[in-house]
Image (cartoon, helix red, strand yellow):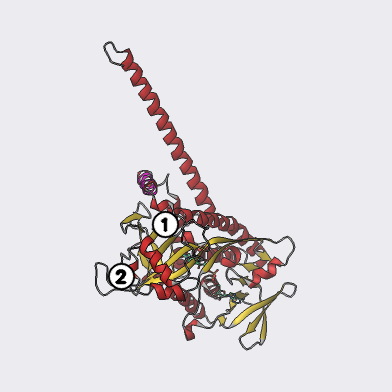
Amino acid sequence: MPRTAVIVGAGLGGSLLAHFLGQRGWHVRVFERRGDPRARGYVGGRSINLAISARGIHALERAGLADEVKTHGIRMPGRMLHSPTGATAFVPYSADPTRAIMSFSRSALNMMLIQAAASHANVELAFDHRCTEIDEARGEVTFERADGTRVAATADLIVGADGSYSAMRGHFEKRERFEYSQSYLAHGYKELSIPPVASGPHAPFAMDPKALHIWPRGGSMMIALPNPDGSFTCTLFWPFEAPAGSGEASFATVRDGKAALERFRREYPDAVPLMPDLVGEFDRNPVGSMVTVRCWPWALGGRFALLGDAAHAIVPFYGQGANASFEDCESLVDALERHPTDVATAIDEYQRDRKPNADAIADMALANFVEMRDKTAHLSFKLKKKLDHALNRWMPNAFVPLYDLVSFTTVPYAKARARARRQDRLVLDAAIALGALLVVAAAFVGDRLLRTPGATP
Ligand SMILES: Cc1cc2nc3c(=O)[nH]c(=O)nc-3n(C[C@H](O)[C@H](O)[C@H](O)COP(=O)(O)OP(=O)(O)OC[C@H]3O[C@@H](n4cnc5c(N)ncnc54)[C@H](O)[C@@H]3O)c2cc1C
């Protein structure tokens, strides 16, 4: 008898998991709230493009999809920092120039994963099915179709991969002793765009496509990632509200496109000529919010499990949410392979493996917002990156900067963070010791000079 799974949500994590389980002979049913993107095109989603790095690529390699996926991605080996005067500076992500994060179209990536899942005869996909109820005792999930009719499904394994506002997690929340917290950022985001150009040094791109562009402005920032059609998707991160009289831009104070244009002319002057529809897009496009969700347990009733944003929504500033969801899929299928007849033990091992790592990347993503919007604007940031890269070149095995560990390795997030802290402490200790040594040496030389007959004090 094949093992059976129900997956709620055919987003990035849900469709990759369906493909993995399909490859392993499971009978899988995936239920997705939205319509079928293969028939209607991709509608909605949380961002137009996204950065995928080593962890995501590793999972896609295991799924046999990396080559296909890589043909759609654009390599970004560093950040391009734009100052308020329009001057730019390129800061590589790694000492190794072959290392790059990749910009992907979310819709193309999701579509590819859905097609991969659908290629298995043992995987069924049902769109326009919204999960509404979970009956833990019966091991059942209920879905409502667009016409209001309902369908119930059961399986050996039932996974909630239904995103940050997960219906499955909503059921978990009703359970006693379920730990749950959600914390919204005081900033929102709005997507804007830079269209392709007919001429110029990077045509069809209006700027260098081999970089993630950042306009750091202290309390806020804009970023831009390249798309295969030559356009860039810009994401503007502003506070929802700014303190009265602070003069800071916020979505509350800058209410329409005309006011935004004025603000952009002052704060993002080099971007303005590249954004011909800035006013219209600012007026049309919604402001999104960003939430960090932490919860525990992720597994319930011996068959229900949460995965991806449903278990651990994080803010997007390390570009790791989708990467972490893909790692969840790998961890879960590995645990299921270790325990082929015991789903309860497998999902317990999965949640214990992933929870500390999800917590670590949630913290690092929050910290990276400050780094991106503020620290990158300072000379000290560029010097620190130079020092990190020099140390990494000098001692490639002993010193690996945190950004490399997170984006270019599959070292678990919690271990990566602990290792980077240890390394930073060692560097600080070495700097203090070196400073002390220099002070002692200077004192010694001074003393010798004073004792030298005829030397002037
Ligand atoms: C602005 C922004 C930029 C980002 N940039 C990056 C980046 O550069 N790199 C990166 O790695 N991550 C990034 N992320 C995070 C990334 O988008 C998520 O972590 C990732 O999509 C999580 O995948 P998932 O499958 O868990 O959830 P999702 O991709 O959100 O999929 C959930 C699916 O469940 C469906 N669903 C929801 N409710 C129900 C229901 N009741 N019944 C049935 N189906 C349901 C949804 O329609 C959706 O298809 C970004 C996020 C944002 C907001």
Give the prevailing secondary structure in the magenta stretch: helix
Question: At numbered mark 2, what does the secondary structure look like: helix, strand or loop?
Answer: loop
Whether residue 389 appears in magenta in the rendering, the answer is yes
Q: CA distance from mark 1 to mark 2?
A: 24 Å
357 falls in the magenta region: no
Of the pair 52 and 125, the residue shown nearer to us: 52
Q: Does the rendering let one see residue 224?
A: no
Name the secondary structure under disc 1.
loop
* Image position, residue 113 (x, y; %): 48, 75
**Quadrant of residue 258 within the rendered picture:** bottom left
Q: Residue at x 36, y 24 (%)?
A: 442
Which amino acid, mark 2? Phe
Q: Is residue 451 left or right of residue 312?
A: left
**Which residue of the protein is positioned furthest toward the top in this rendering?**
453
Pick the residue in front: 244 or 364: 244
Residue 217 tag number: 1
Marks 1 and 2 in Cβ contact (< 8 Å)? no
Instruction: Say what amino acid the circle numbered 1 marks.
Output: Arg
Q: How many numbered discs, if any?
A: 2
Residue drawn at x 42%, y 68% is 260
Q: Looking at the image, which is closer to me, 22 or 455?
A: 455
Identify the residue shown where x is 34% and y is 65%. Answer: 271
Which corner quadrant of the image does residue 278 belong to? bottom left
Q: Residue furthest bottom?
A: 147
Q: Position of residue 151 (x, y in %)?
A: 66, 84
- The residue carrying mark 2 is 205
Relative to 299, residue 39 above or below: below
Residue 242 in view (yes/no): yes
Name the quarter where the C terminus is drawn.
Answer: top left
Magenta range: 381-391
